[in-house]
Image (spheres, rainbow, N blue to C red):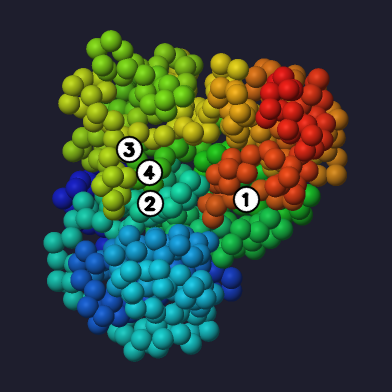
Amino acid sequence: MRRIRHFTPDSTRTIVDIVQDHARERPNNIALIYQDRTVTYRALDEGANRYAHWALAQGVMRGDAVALLVENRPEFVMAWLGILKIGGIAALINTNLRGAPLAHSIGIANTKHVIVGAELAANLAEAAPQIESQPAVWITSETHDGNLDAALAASSIAPPPADARAGVTCKDKAFYIYTSGTTGLPKAANFTHLRMMFMMNGFSGGLNTTERDRMYNALPLYHTAGGVCALGAMLLVGGACIIRRKFSVSEFWDDCYRYRATCFQYIGELCRYLLNAPPHPHERDHQIRVITGNGLRAEIWPLFQQRFAIPKIIEFYGATEGNVSMLNYDGTVGAIGRIPSYMRSLITTRLVRFDIEAEMPVRGPDGLCIECENDEAGEAIGEITGEAGKTFDGYTKAQDTNKKILHDVFKKGDTWFRTGDLLRRDAHGYFYFVDRIGDTFRWKGENVSTNEVAEALNVVPGVRDANVYGVAIPGHDGRAGMAALVAGPEFDLSALAQNLARNLPAYAQPLFIRLQPEIEITGTFKLRKVDLVQQGFDPRTIADPLYVLEHGVYVPLDAARYDAIVSGQTKI
């Protein structure tokens, strides 16, 4: 909080100025490490200057967007930094997208130029006919043989004219960062310079980073966790960010050892992949002093920390577009952060009672929302005010923005940001993640948290991955639990039901099991459930092995059993 007190919506100092200062004061400090390349702060700034001059030559002006569709590498950082140098906006496109979702993401940014890595040029070409604005395509490659590479080679390494971003303040947009698309088409969140400064300083302060630190970053740079939090924790202090093109379980600890990483950023699923992997010679032979991330489940937290000799874990909570964020500084297992009672007036994050079926907060007789008691799950919301850190900048489309705003919450006229997450708070002010709204469903008159069911499944021997969701059954209220599992050779289906019965109430035990060769995830390691929910549990249309819980054991679900269930002949 000391770090961010100087940043206000009208501040003019941004990450552009900070990197330029490093380039001048510590030019030989390593900023980026990628494979066998090292990029100093001087080289990073000069590379960004080339992009800035290129953009100016194309007529890009303050407030114009340039789409960036490039897999992780130093040029990704140079590109957006150069665009920011002239007051532009970088639209950070998810590199996993194809077809209509890719065209949609570029289209809603209203961009006239797309920088595309040669490795993704075919994907862009496939989607191009669906992009209404028909932007100019600039190809860059690691062999420097794209049309953008030629243009950059002819560009100056000198800083662009100072008036190129005259008038830019922290309240101006720096990025469009997209939701992961776990449901429907991605939305483009407006990401301001102020939000960037808050996030970068929050993580740098929380990790206590210095210029001697090296952050290992295997997360995608197009998203907030890898591209702002992990990267920013280093850029602010003159440290180095080790960029990995894509996460690799087998090479993770080799990289940490080889590049002398002192910290890394995780996603919960990344930790599970590492924990499921065979022992590695460098998994304890490293210089890691602290790690940070979100989604590290309580049931594997101590195992992960002990096996890999991690001195400190700082779990965090937050969203790209939201004004609710927390850091678990003290490492309390399972907690995503803490707001002590004496900080409630300063940090206006609250939990409100929530109706699972209506998917809306509960309101009392006075029409206002009801704050949750300790240990009661509710939706996390954050008050929207004009104060720094409490704004909500929304999305490119007004209707998407309006859906995330709650009015008349605790008094008439107030407005709050809806996180879409169910959390609970204990008596000491620690917060714990319960589930995403929409993932929690009702069955047998009870609320079922997919996250809690997944936690119970993930400790079952042989379960490598678990994706839990609810499916509709004709003639039944709510949704029945179903779990898609990736199982190893030691998995024992015959013992699964007994194992779950010891850890879950009867209504929460999955009625259906689907065995899959792998779990589909987004580029940021979030589980995709939409297709699974739509496919349901019909063995005639699903090739994967299916099972149903009958008399305390899971038995194969064939067409006859399916028909008996949907017709009501079999009681469930």
> How far separated are the C-alphas under marks 1 and 4?
31 Å
> How far separated are the C-alphas under marks 4 and 3?
24 Å
Q: Secondary structure at mark 2?
A: loop
Q: Residue furthest top?
A: 365
Amino acid tagged 4: Gly
Q: Which residue matches tag 1?
A: 520
Q: Which residue matches tag 2?
A: 187
Judged left or right of residue 549, residue 397 is left
Q: Earlier in the sequence, mark 4 or mark 3?
A: 4
User: Residue 404, which numbered label?
Assistant: 3
What is the crowding at mark 1: few (fewer than 14 residues within 10 Å), some, or many (at least 20)?
some
Q: Which residue matches tag 4?
A: 202
Decide which of 316, 95 is in the foreground and name it: 95
Image position of 163 with respect to 17: above or below: below
Residue, x 59% and y 31% (percent of image)? 472
User: Residue 545, which numbered label?
Assistant: none
Decide which of 479, 237 is in the foreground and name it: 479
Amino acid tagged 1: Glu
Quarter of the figure with the C terminus: top right
Residue, x 45% and y 14% (percent of image)? 374
